[in-house]
Image (cartoon, rainbow, N blue to C red):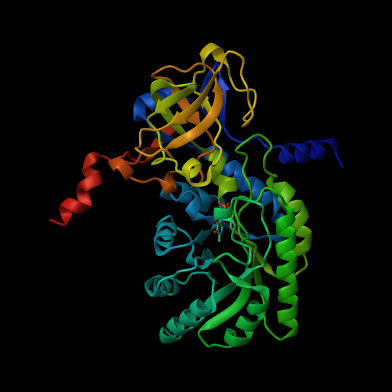
Amino acid sequence: MSFALERRLALDHHPRMDHFQYRGGVLHCEELALPELAQRFGTPLYVYSRQTLIDHYRRLSEAWTPVAPWLCFSVKSCSNLHILRIMRECGAAFDVVSGGEMARALEAGADPSRIVFAGVGKSDAEIRDALGAGIGFFNVESEAEMDNLASIAESMGRRAPAALRVNPDVDPKTHVYTTTGKRETKFGVDLERARRVFHDFARRPGLDLCAIHLHIGSPVNTVEPYIQSITKGLGLIEQLRREGFALRAINIGGGYGANYEDHQAPSALDYAAQVVPLLKGADLTVMLEPGRMITANAGILLTRTLYTKQSGDKHFLIVDGSMTELIRPALYGSFHFVWPVQPAGGAVPPQRSASLKMEGGMLVDVVGPVCESSDFLAKERWLPPVIRGDLLCIFTTGAYGFVMASQYNSRPRPAEVLVEGDQVRVIRRRETYDDLVALERAAG
Ligand SMILES: Cc1ncc(COP(=O)(O)O)c(C=O)c1O
């Protein structure tokens, strides 16, 4: 192997996480200093780096080239139209889980025949719309849904392309709320039932049942659970083929990890290196549904310190961002690295890590203004001294961040801005108090 190639592979296994870097003691997004963005657009503010999105997409695409997969960007991870357009320009297909996500993907210019539609509870209207639009695949989660899909397609004189979601009973070793591939979850049908579903439904005139879908959880920070689930999936396909069914595709789902802390997740190449050999030569179209791996590190939440407070031995930073902008810590106990945008004494973080300790620093909980004890963004973190007015960056919030934002406590949702080099534009304006009541006023 040439030195250049070895070096490229080494870099790919420890790829640059993002384009949020400290320069001269100030955090920048690409070429722009974050204090200027806070000044211009206010806080709390979601800031995305276009180059980071593109880098992560390209790494995935290059790593999986040998099986030329459909990379179906998982819209649920970050559904802003402008982000979807970037994904489409990169060449992505799309993974949607609702009629609303399908509408977004189509508005972003997605080719409907490269959209896959998952979800345990698709309504009749959603199924009809998706059939009418000519989407690529329905990922079907139960016998009852398969029957309904077939009936609706038959009534429309259509043949619905369908993948059966199979639950391979594999433990992805992630949070119980985001575990989907174990037998006792609500998703998919187990391996024994899967065969029966093909026997019962594959010959219905309204169905082109030609694929299986696997998604075991998210994030899955080791490769082994994928190997187990894909091996079981391929075994099922082989058996079904022997029984006379024409299987053309396998969708191996999403869940690929992102670095919330340095070196926490395998790289795109790490996953591909072990999974591609299983799929190569299987004579199947391969589909993936990555979300977090592309978007998590492409976005940060910028928030300003409103007050500092001490209760007993505890120090709190009360900031203007909260669980209404970022619910992941409250919902899953998720870790997000937090650091001041202009740290006192120029103390840039040596690494992004949950166990970072700091001489001369303060041990704090970072909390928001919402009236819930679960309203926290970070707990027990060592930070350089922070005072009222200081900006904090909540890192790795591009995935499952803004998409889960709410207006609870009648808090208008924040703006989202997109940085490209030294340019920035608003891709969703900050909501106003008028926005909060507009639909109620319209009701008379
Ligand atoms: C069926 C399915 N596909 C893809 C994803 C995307 O997961 P991730 O963003 O972790 O890649 C999810 C997320 O839960 C999912 O449920």
On the picture, is 229 further left or further right than 394? right
Q: Residue furthest right?
A: 1
Give how far across and how far down residue 409 sits, in percent. 30, 41
At a point 64% along the width and 27% down the height, the residue shown is 351
| Quadrant where the N terminus is found in the figure | top right
Q: Nearer the viewer, residue 309 or 378?
A: 309
How many numbered markers are drawn? 0
Give how far across and how far down residue 231 sits, in percent. 75, 66
Quarter of the view holding residue 185: bottom right
Examine the rendering and report whether any part of residue 22 can be seen: yes
Examine the rendering and report whether any part of residue 92 can be seen: no
Q: Residue furthest front?
A: 312
| Quadrant where the C terminus is found in the figure | bottom left
Q: Residue furthest left?
A: 444
Q: In the image, ligand 1 is in what quadrant? A: bottom right
At a point 35% along the width and 37% down the height, the residue shown is 370
Q: Nearer the viewer, residue 118 or 387?
A: 387
Please, is residue 49 above or below residue 442 in the view?
above
Please, is residue 145 above or below residue 81 in the view?
below
Please, is residue 71 above or below residue 418 in the view?
below
Give how far across and how far down residue 88 sits, in percent. 51, 53
Quarter of the view holding residue 51: top right
Give how far across and how far down residue 420 sits, in percent. 49, 35
Q: Nearer the viewer, residue 30 or 181?
A: 181
On the picture, is 404 further left or further right than 13? left
